[in-house]
Each structure stands twice: as structure tokens, then as C-alpha cells.
Image: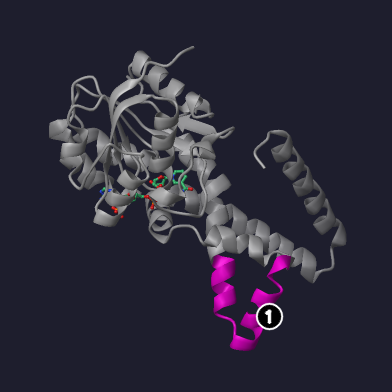
């Protein structure tokens, strides 16, 4: 099915995710015009230099005027302010979406601010790297990854279909989900692993100097893989934990119990228990590879 191009796309926040989408729009000629919005002059200049935006502005209201697609791709803590700023300027019939890693909080913050004449369809392309900013983006980021849309019960079917086609064009497999379900699933698959990585690397940085330098030297033993995740953007991840508090705390509780059980198995020399768990987890890795999500 072919995709109907957008006349004007406003991307509020032209970092890793926003600029990757802009590159897809450019590559496939899906936008007559792309307007980028960012707070810093350096970010806006970079977006223009990279040729991924036709215009760039600090004013989100100005950015969305006349746009038929608006994509919010900033850290979550900026959403409420952006919602208030863009609301009076949104064109009737525009699709307003986002790429935020948490969905219930987004709907809570944005929905009351948006006029009834736009189609608000929250989304989350589950793809990323530990890098940030417009230079970090690339069009292939989304290929073979999942995009989760969390439309409200009264969502416009045509707008949902159009947004679905856009993410499919970016190479994604698109599913719809209830926002609270999304937040629980992502708490386990993304938010908890990040928290664990931040904790392990934090613990290592608190070690006395001699041990710390050895940890870095011998990091290939496993530690190195955690440091990649723990290098993810601090502001983005602060916002994720503040905005998905309940689901993360629930998964963390389960994790702590399982960790205690493992601690006990080690203490009592229960090798069978350890081996049994490690065998099951190895099978999970195989199924991720088979699902082409490795
Ligand atoms: P990023 O690379 O840091 O980009 C954020 C962009 O937003 C920057 O261009 C920043 O530029 C701009 N910005 C920040 N505050 C703003 C404001 N108040 N008004 C206008 N622009 C503003 O971040 P990202 O990784 O693309 O993440 C963006 C969103 O995608 C987050 O909500 C995150 O949850 C979600 N997400 C991230 C990933 C991932 O792995 N990174 C994956 C999926 C979804 P200035 O600093 O110049 O304003």
C-alpha cells in the first residue's frame, strides 16, 4: 500500500529519534517541507546543515503552524510545556504524535491541552542507541524494530492507518497497545535493564581506586556491555523513571525477590538452581535472535 506524503511535518526535538525520522521522510520524499524545533541554536544549525530540515525554529508554536503531521521527540519533561505552546497553532485535521518511551504519562500531559480538531495518536518506536542529538540519527535505525502505537479509544481510523504506514515505511513492524500495558512491558524490557546497568556501573565507580582501574582494564568479562547501556542520555532516562514510576517499581520488586533467591542459592551451594535458571535464560536469548531482535 502506498503512503500519502505529508505537506508539512513539524518535528519538535530533532535529536536521535526525531532526526532519524526526518532522514526517512527525506529519503522517501514523504514530506513537502520539514520544520525542526529545538531550544539551542547549535542543534537547529546542525539540523539545517545536515539537510534534514528546511526550516528550524526555537518556537514550537511557529513550527507546527500549517503542519499536517506533528511529531514530538523531546525528553518527556518538556511535553507539557510544548503541548501548551503548540495547541493554539495546530491545524484542523493534523496528526499529532510522539515517540516517548512512556505512554500513560504522555496522554495525561498532552491530551487535555490539545484541541479536538487534531488527531492525537501517541507512539513509541522501540529503537535507539546510547547516542543523542541530530548527528546521531540514521534512517536505518528503525529497520526491523517494533513501533507501538497507543491510540485512544476514539482515535480516527484513517489517521491511525496513515501513521502506521509511515512507521512501516521506516521499516518498522507496527502494533497497537493500551498505554498501561505498553508501560508495563517496557518497564521490564527496557527500563529495568537500564536501571540495572546504571546501578552496576555506579557501584563500580564507587570502588576504591585500585579496584576501579582493574574493572576498566578487564571490562570485557561482562561489565563493558552494561557500560554501553549506562552511557544512555541522563535527561531522557531521568524522565523515563519519573514518568513510569509504578510499573518500574513493580518490576523492580519482582527483580529484587529473584535476586535474593539467587543470592540464597549461591550461599547454600545450590548449583542445580543456578544451572536451571541459566539454562532457561539461554533459551530466551535464542528466541530473541530468532525473532531478529538481537
Ligand atoms: P535526544 O537525541 O537528546 O534529542 C532530543 C531533542 O529534543 C534535541 O534535539 C533537543 O535539542 C530537543 N529538545 C529538548 N528539549 C526541548 C524543548 N523543550 N523544546 C524543543 N526541543 C527540545 O533524545 P532522543 O534519544 O531522540 O529521545 C527523544 C524522545 O524519544 C524521548 O522522549 C525518548 O523517551 C524517546 N525515545 C528514545 C529512544 C532512545 O533510545 N534514545 C528510543 C525510543 C524513544 P535542544 O537541546 O537544542 O533543545
Q: Nearer the viewer, residue 208 or 144?
A: 144
Please give left or right for residue 255 compared with residue 90 in the image: right
User: Against 200, is 117 above or below?
Assistant: above
The image position of residue 142, as x and y in percent, is: 52, 36
Of residue 240 and residue 130, the one placed in the foreground of this image is 130
Which secondary structure, mark 1? helix
| Residue 109, picture quadrant | top left
Residue range highlighted in magenta: 199-220
Image position, residue 131 (x, y; %): 48, 54
Describe residue 190's horizontal placement relative to residue 117 as left or right: right
The part of the image, by quadrant, that contains residue 146 is top right
Front in this rendered view, residue 196 or 160:
160
Residue ranking furthest to the right: 272
Q: Position of residue 241 (x, y in %)?
A: 42, 54
In the picture, measured across the screen, residue 58 lies left or right of residue 250, that is left
Query: On the image, numbered disc 1 is attached to which residue?
Result: 214
Instruction: Count the marks.
Output: 1
The residue at the point 17 percent across, 44 percent down is: 59
Residue 100 seen in render:
no
Residue lying at the far top of the rendered structure: 1
Most extreme residue toward the left is 88
Look at the image and tell me whether residue 214 can be seen.
Answer: yes
Residue depicted at 63% across the width and 58% down the height: 257
* Magenta span: chief secondary structure: helix
Amino acid at each position: 500500500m502506498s503512503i500519502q506524503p505529508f505537506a508539512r511535518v513539524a518535528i519538535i526535538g530533532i535529536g536521535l529519534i526525531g532526526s532519524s525520522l526526518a532522514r526517512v521522510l527525506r529519503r522517501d520524499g514523504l514530506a513537502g517541507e520539514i520544520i525542526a524545533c529545538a531550544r539551542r541554536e547549535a542543534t537547529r544549525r546542525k539540523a539545517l546543515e545536515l539537510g534534514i530540515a528546511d526550516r528550524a525554529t526555537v518556537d514550537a508554536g511557529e513550527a507546527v503552524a500549517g503542519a499536517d503531521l506533528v511529531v514530538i521527540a523531546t525528553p518527556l519533561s518538556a511535553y507539557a510545556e510544548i503541548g501548551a505552546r503548540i495547541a493554539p497553532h495546530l491545524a484542523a485535521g493534523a496528526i499529532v504524535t510522539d515517540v516517548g518511551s512512556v505512554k500513560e504519562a504522555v496522554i495525561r500531559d498532552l491530551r487535555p491541552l490539545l484541541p479536538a480538531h487534531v488527531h492525537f495518536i501517541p507512539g513509541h518506536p522501540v529503537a535507539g542507541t546510547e547516542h543523542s542529538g541530530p548527528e546521531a540519527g540514521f534512517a536505518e535505525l528503525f529497520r526491523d524494530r517494533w513501533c507501538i502505537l497507543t491510540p485512544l479509544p476514539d482515535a480516527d481510523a484513517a489517521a491511525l492507518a496513515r501513521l502506521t504506514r509511515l512507521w512501516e515505511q521506516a521499516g518498522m513492524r507496527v502494533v497497537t497497545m493500551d498505554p498501561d500495558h505498553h508501560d508495563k512491558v517496557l518497564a521490564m524490557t527496557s527500563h529495568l535493564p537500564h536501571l540495572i546497568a546504571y546501578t552496576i556501573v555506579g557501584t563500580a565507580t564507587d570502588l576504591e581506586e585500585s579496584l576501579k582501574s582493574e574493572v576498566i582494564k578487564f571490562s570485557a568479562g561482562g561489565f563493558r556491555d552494561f557500560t554501553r547501556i549506562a552511557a544512555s542520555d541522563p535527561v531522557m532516562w531521568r524522565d523515563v523513571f519519573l514518568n513510569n514510576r509504578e510499573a518500574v517499581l513493580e518490576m523492580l520488586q519482582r527483580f529484587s525477590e529473584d535476586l535474593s533467591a539467587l543470592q540464597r542459592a549461591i550461599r547454600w551451594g545450590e548449583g542445580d538452581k543456578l544451572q536451571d535458571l541459566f539454562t532457561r535464560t539461554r533459551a530466551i536469548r535464542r528466541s530473541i535472535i530468532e525473532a531478529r531482535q538481537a
